[in-house]
Image (cartoon, coloured by chain):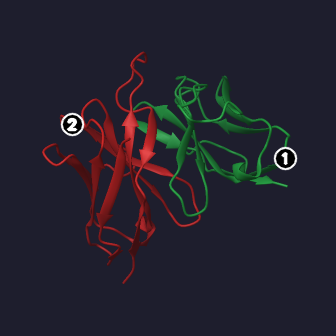
Amino acid sequence: QVQLQQWGAGLLKPSETLSLTCAVYGGSFSGYYWSWIRQPPGKGLEWIGEINHSGSTNYNPSLKSRVSISVDTSQNQFSLKLSSVTAADTAVYYCARGRIAPAAPVKGSTRFDPWGQGTLVTVSS
Amino acid sequence: QSALTQPASVSGSPGQSITISCTGTSSDVGSYNLVSWYQQHPGKAPKLMIYEGNKRPSGVSNRFSGSKSGNTASLTISGLQADDEADYYCCSYAGSSRVFGGGTKLTVL
């Protein structure tokens, strides 16, 4: 059964770069999109972006200018970098396995399962 | 893209059925049968309950079902149980992005 374990710095100052990594255990790394999703305290979910094992990425247009997702297939890990953070980026960040819909003529993931445990990242001066 | 629209809260008594709506646009929910639903208990990561509109992952109770009409998707939970009390989020494929709903808090009375 696949499990995702994530880690990274939990406290940042404004203008710094957020950096998180997610490791995948117990399952195939190829054939999926590996995603990042965030949730501000007390609020809803926001999709950040995703990457597949070949390095093909899709990003949320609203965050695209500040986001970079990379993959290390030798370690079955993928990482998120979000630059120039502000207080508005304070959130619990989740990694998740994005699954495709083979019969649908679309690019990228169409559902997320399973999810990592989440990492609270706080941006404060 | 704007977030999908969900009611802030719904409630029901044990054994009853409830339905949560998720309204989008012709660019997301209306264009694709690719809506998924997630259950989130407090302090926990979301869990996939429904995908591609009406499919259940292995292990999810058949008390959970999904449907879609036009730009609105719906999640129905029948035979409500205490453990169903949680936040529920819809999500739709939207071409270059994926868009979530604002979430619905389900209270089991």
Q: Are marks 1 and 2 on the same chain?
A: no
Q: Quadrant of the C terminus of chain B?
A: bottom right
**Residue A71 at x, y = what percent?**
19, 46
- Residue A97 marker: none
Q: Which residue in the rendered view is the most extreme toward the left?
A: A74
Rendered view: B103 above or below A20: above
Secondary structure of residue under mark 2: loop
Identify the residue at image location x=47%, y=33%.
Answer: B94
Chain A: colour as depicted: red
**Residue B47 at x, y = what percent?**
53, 46
* Chain under disc 1: B
Secondary structure of residue under mark 1: loop
Rendered view: A61 above or below A104: below
Q: Which residue is mark 2?
A: A53
Q: Closest to the observer: B15 or B50? A: B15
- Residue B14 marker: 1
Rendered view: B46 above or below A12: above
Chain shown green: that is: B
The reply to whether callout 1 and callout 2 are in contact (CB within 8 Å) is no
Instruction: Give me the C-alpha separation between circle 1 and circle 2.
Output: 44 Å
